[in-house]
Amino acid sequence: MPSWFRTFLQYAVIFLATGLLIWFSLRGLTVGEGGNKWGYLMQTWKEAHKGWLILMAALLILSHCVRAARWRMLLAPVGFTPKFRDSFLSLMVGYLVNLVIPRGGEVSRCYNLFKLDKTPVEISFGTVVVERIVDILCLLFLILLAFFLESQKLFAFIDTIPKLAPGDNSRLKAVAYIVGGLITVTLLIFWLVKRNQRLRNFFRKTWSGFKGGLLSVFKLKNKWPFIIYSITIWLLYFFMSYCVVRAFPATSVLGLEAVLSLFAIGSIAMAVPTPGGAGSYHVLVPQGLVFLYGIPKTDAVAFTFIFHGWQTAILIVAGAISLIVTSLLVKKNPKVG
């Protein structure tokens, strides 16, 4: 089977799963006789308070500015100081790619930075891994805080999520196949590298750069700005959720604890490897709104679609502009690219 076909098949399955999840979520959107689901979504959009949505968009862009500044901070200890402009453009291009190829943005933003600033991809990718580790720790803290404040509701919500049925080992078999496949691929790569000098040299160079980026956080002269940036990013994410909750009449009555719970559920859904978290987000968040806070299912589904759609639209516009600006900068400066 050609490699291009395998890649196509992989992403076809991902997009199919995303489509099925969105379809499953839309089934919960029930309108009156003769009503139209998309018409109901547009009506919900019209009723939304646009001031809160605009504030959410501003906070989203600000959070990415802080993230770009934090990325530059991690690159400094390994000898690279890209301009803020270059790191921000690369970050936004990465988010755009993530909407099409799950987790593809992590690599594409490194390649984009290389085109603009000649920062080696293996080094910048090491710093991206550090960022992701820090983000996971921040997310875990917020999830723990949400469970501390809303433990009864969240544990009850988890019980509503379908689990592995007793005696059904199909999922366990799937996990075993995946682990076995990963071990096989790893052993194959190890065998090829051992037999090929060029591959050995390539992997040594790549690992050396990746390790340097990975350890950059320990080389920071002053770690407090990095910690403050990390906290600020997640606070901005939280207040983005608060803005959107306040923007819709059906959810505007919810308090900060509810926003925190929904934020935790939404963050977990966005971590699922579908394009931009689509599908998984549209299933879990409405379920949480209905079960935890008694929001009518139709309003919950409409809220989720517009929330996710508004955020996605901002990332598409910002990412497309960043991609165009990157292309212009590369053409303008012959030393770039």
Image: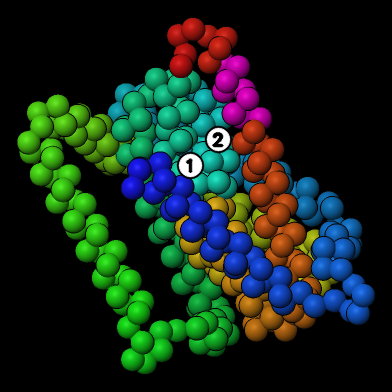
Q: Which segment did they paint magenta?
A: 321-329
**Residue 89: horizontal and vertical position, in percent?**
56, 30
Residue at the far front: name it.
1
CA–CA distance between discs 2 and 1? 7 Å
Q: Is residue 32 left or right of residue 193?
A: right
**Residue 256: horizontal and vertical position, in percent?**
66, 70
Image: 282 above or below 214:
below
Q: Is residue 324 magenta?
A: yes
Residue 81 shows in the view: no
Q: Is residue 201 left or right of residue 54?
A: left
Q: Which mark is residue 192?
A: none
Q: Residue at x 77, y 80 (%)?
A: 296
Q: Residue at x 57, y 37 (%)?
A: 92
> Upstream in the sequence, badge 2 or badge 1?
2
**What residue would you read off at disc 2?**
93
**Residue 12: horizontal and vertical position, in percent?**
51, 54
**What residue would you read off at disc 1?**
105
